[in-house]
Structures are given as structure tokens and as C-alpha cells.
Image (tube, coloured by chain):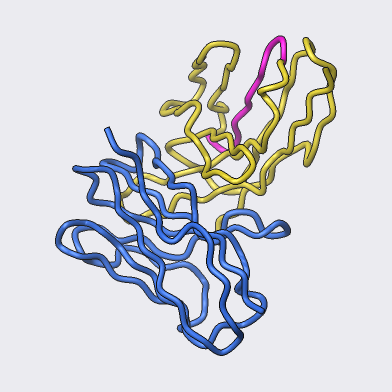
Chain colours: A blue, B yellow
Amino acid sequence: KAGVTQTPRYLIKTRGQQVTLSCSPISGHRSVSWYQQTPGQGLQFLFEYFSETQRNKGNFPGRFSGRQFSNSRSEMNVSTLELGDSALYLCASSRDKNYGYTFGSGTRLTVV
Amino acid sequence: GQQLNQSPQSMFIQEGEDVSMNCTSSSIFNTWLWYKQDPGEGPVLLIALYKAGELTSNGRLTAQFGITRKDSFLNISASIPSDVGIYFCAGLGLTSYDKVIFGPGTSLSVIP
């Protein structure tokens, strides 16, 4: 079965721009979570969506937002990009979090 | 907030050696998860633990859910070069509204 698909795989943006990242979860998985991964900070939780509702949110500024569509696909948006937003953004889906997430390969965002 | 600590931060071992790493928290978790991340990819679930004291194996990997519910351990026996990567522990509370919290990771290098 298809895994979690994230697009694009790589992205270069200029400081001040905005960016939208996309995530298609595994079929049947209604929970989608987003994480930011940087070398010094590990996996930092951004937000979780379940059935189009944000169920949880991490400690990120309001420039980071997300949404989930009725088909469970999810997008996250970062506005007014800063150099420090350069990171690997990982999306993960699950049918039930207790059984663990399945992660996508991530989107590598570089802000210049 | 909830935070996980992993030790050691990094390990360099000879092929064939056994590996032990652990994950500790000041909070109680009801589920412990262990993931491995290869370079350029998203983390992959290795083992999930659901009960205090539980010991679960997956091939050469064995993980334990600590009795206090505040820690977990992962052992790898007879390491091979493909064990190289970053190993993350993750903890999850009881409710569906709890976040999955990830530790900072243990980087494993295997010297052939």
C-alpha cells in the first residue's frame, strides 16, 4: 500500500516569502501530524489534525499554520519565512497514535 | 512541558557488538515507541510498548517499557553496518488529545 507522500521533496525560498507543504496520508489514516526537524533541536511537534480539526498544537509562532481536508490530506503553511525556518518538515499519519505514526520522507526547506 | 532525554547522545561501536540506549522522562507515559531514521528519510517505527515492564523484540532489537513508566530501553544485539542511523524514543499519554513527544535521538555509528 502507498505510504505517506510529501511534496515537494526539496524547496528553496527567500526570507520573507511564504511556503505551503503538502502531505497525503496512508489511506484510512485520519490523524496527520507535522514535525520540524533541525540538527540541534530534534523532532519538534508542530500540530496534529484529526478529521479536519486541529487536535493539538506545538509551541510555534502563528506564522506556522495548517489544515486538513475531508480526504485527510493535509497542508502546512509558513508565512514570512525566516532563515531559522530552514529544516526538514516531516508529516506522519496514523489510524491510532498508540500504534505509532508512519512518516513521510519529508520536505527539506531551505530559506536563503 | 513534557520532555524526553535520550542517552547516549551518540555511539561509535564495532560491528558485532551489542548496543544499549535509554530514554527517560519526568512524566509518565502510557505508550513508548522506538523509531529509527536513516539519512534523508523519515523515521520508521521499530517497536511499540504498551504496558509497564513489557519486553518486546523485533529481530535483533529488544525494547522494554520501564516499571516506573517514565523510561524505556532499547537494545540491539550483534550490530551490523545497516544499523547506522538515529534512534528516537517517543512517548504518548493516555488520551487521543495527547501529543506524541520525541526524544532528541541517539546517533549510532557502526565501524565495520
Residue B76 covered by magenta stretch: yes
Q: Which residue is at the front of the view, B4 or B82?
A: B82
Q: Is residue B79 above or below residue B66?
A: above
Residue B47 % position (x, y) = 48, 26
Q: Residue at x 72, y 23 (%)?
A: B20
The quadrant in which the C terminus of chain B is found is top right
Q: Which residue is at the front of the view, B18 or B44?
A: B44
Asked whether, in this view, residue A50 is left or right of residue B32, the answer is left
Residue extent of the magenta highlight = B69-79
Residue A75 % position (x, y) = 34, 67
Q: Is residue B38 above or below residue A44?
A: above
Q: Residue at x 47, y 84 (%)?
A: A79
Q: Residue at x 48, y 19 (%)?
A: B54
Q: Is residue A46 above or below residue A103?
A: below
Taking the view exactly as shown, the residue that stands out farthest to the left is A70
Q: Residue at x 71, y 10 (%)?
A: B78
